[in-house]
Amino acid sequence: MIPPSEAVASQSASISIASSPEAVFDLVSDLPRMGEWSPESIGGEWIDGATGKAGDWFRGHNRSGEFEWTRESEVVVAERGREFTFVVGGKEANRTWWSYEIEPGTDGETVLTERWWIVNLSPALADMTPQQLQARVDITLGSIQQTLAAIKASAEA
């Protein structure tokens, strides 16, 4: 899913993984395991028996330094082997989006692209100075790159 032109900020990175698109999807959509790969996420759980289909909600838990927070998110795309996308606070809030796009690569590899974009600032982001917001955008790119490398290591193990 490509960020809309009205996005306030966005970051993305890609990596080639020696694994099938379905196996890669199974990893990126496994919320409790996300804490194994992400430097910020510490996992999550599905709400009310959800299983990860479009329209399902989950609670994602995060940590940065000593600061911890939990946010509810809505899955907007869940196509096994192709894409897993969710939006923090749900589609109606239209705030922070995360997307994992999966495409066939060369020599049987799979290309995984992680995208992050903000359409509407959350209250916490709205309270930031422009410099603080830019620092957050910059940190996010590093987090995405670390997450992709760790997912690759898991998928190829």
Image: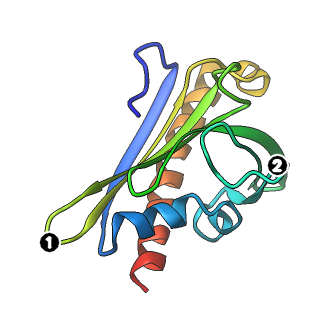
Measured as percent of width and height from the top left, residue 132 is found at 64, 29
**What residue sits 78% from the left and 21% below the top?**
123
Please tell me in which quadrant of the rendered image residue 15 appears: bottom left
Classify mark 1: helix, strand or loop: loop
Q: Is residue 105 above or below residue 99?
A: below
Kind of residue at disc 2: Ile
Dot placed on the residue nearer the N-terminal end, 2 or 1: 2
Measured as percent of width and height from the top left, residue 19 is found at 34, 74
**What residue sits 61% from the left and 47% below the top?**
53
The CA distance from mark 2 to mark 1 is 39 Å
Quadrant placement of the C terminus = bottom left
Q: Is residue 32 above or below residue 62?
A: below
Kind of residue at disc 1: Asp
Extreme top residue here? 6
Name the residue carrying label 1: 107
| Total numbered circles | 2
Q: Which mark is residue 47?
A: 2
Please tell me in which quadrant of the rendered image residue 65 appears: bottom right
**What residue sits 70% from the left and 42% below the top?**
56
